[in-house]
Image: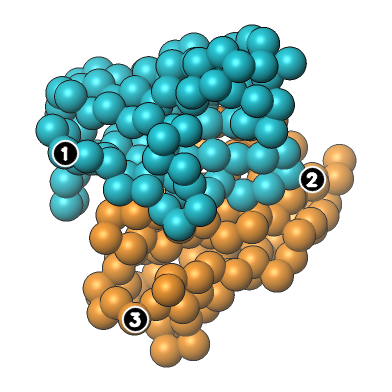
Chain colours: A orange, B cyan
Amino acid sequence: AQTVTQSQPEMSVQEAETVTLSCTYDTSESDYYLFWYKQPPSRQMILVIRQEAYKQQNATENRFSVNFQKAAKSFSLKISDSQLGDAAMYFCASDRDDKIIFGKGTRLHILP
Amino acid sequence: GAVVSQHPSWVICKSGTSVKIECRSLDFQATTMFWYRQFPKQSLMLMATSNEGSKATYEQGVEKDKFLINHASLTLSTLTVTSAHPEDSSFYICRAAGGSNQPQHFGDGTRLSIL
C-alpha cells in the first residue's frame, strides 16, 4: 500500500520568514510523482509544486521549493518569504497509478 | 488553462433524498475521473476511480450501491449519493485526468449537507 505521512498537524511562521513542512512516503513503485497541494478556506485544491521521482533536481516554483530525498523517501516543502496568503492547509501527496493519495495535512498559520 | 467544472457547489437536502454531483472537464478529454470525500478537518480520501465507458472501481469500504458513478463521456462524470443520510454530509471533490503526462485538475468541490 502507498502511504503518505505528515507528522506536523499545525505550524506557525512569522510573516517574511521561512518555514519547512515535512512529509515522508512509502511506495513500491520505481517511477512516481510527488505533490504538495494547498487548500485555503475555500477548500479549492491548488497545486503548489510537483516532483518527478526520476529527476534528482529538486523542483522549485518561485518562493516554494522541495527537498526530495528519494532514498529516505522524504519530500519536504520550503516556503520562503512567507506571506499572509500562504495560510492554508497543505497536503503532501503521491501518485499511484494516477491515483493521488494524500497525507493528513499540515495547517500553516502566518503570524503578522 | 484547463478547467474542471463541478456542480452544485453546495447542496442541502432532506434525509432519504438522492443527490447528483456533476464534474465536467471543459477543455480537455478526461479519460479518468477520481472522486474524493473530505470530512471536516480531515484529508481527502479517494472513493472511486472511473474510466470513460467502464464501471467505476471503488476503494475499500466505499459502498458502490450508495455512491453511483457514471462516466459516460470523456467530459462528464457524475456521482449520485443515493438515499443520503446525515452521515453522508461531507465535501465531495472530483479530479479529472487526461492520461499520462496530461492535465490533471480538481473541481472546486461540492459541500453536501443532509438534514
Identity, as a three-letter code, of the amino acid under mark 2 = Ile
Q: Residue B11 appears at what percent x and percent y?
A: 59, 12
Question: What is the number of callouts on the image?
Answer: 3
Left or right: B33 as drawn, with respect to B115: left
What secondary structure is found at the residue carrying circle 1?
A: loop
Identity, as a three-letter code, of the amino acid under mark 1 = Ser
Residue depth check, mark 1 versus mark 3: number of the one nearer the observer: 1
Q: Is residue A102 above or below residue A8?
A: above
**Residue denoted by label 1:** B54
At 42% across and 23% down in the image, what residue appears?
B80
Q: Is residue A111 above or below residue A35?
A: above
Cα separation, mark 2 vs mark 3, equals 36 Å
What secondary structure is found at the residue carrying circle 2?
A: strand
Left or right: A86 as drawn, with respect to B25: right
Mark 1 crowd level (few <14, some 14–19, many ≥20, 10 Å Cα): few
What secondary structure is found at the residue carrying circle 3?
A: loop
At 34% across and 81% down in the image, what residue appears?
A28
Residue A28: which numbered mark, if any? 3
At 47% across and 43% down in the image, what residue appears?
B63
Q: Is residue B65 visible?
A: yes
- Asked where in the image residue B54 lies, by quadrant, the reply is top left
* Residue situated in front as seen by the camera: A99 or B56: B56
Q: Residue B20 appears at what percent x and percent y?
A: 43, 16
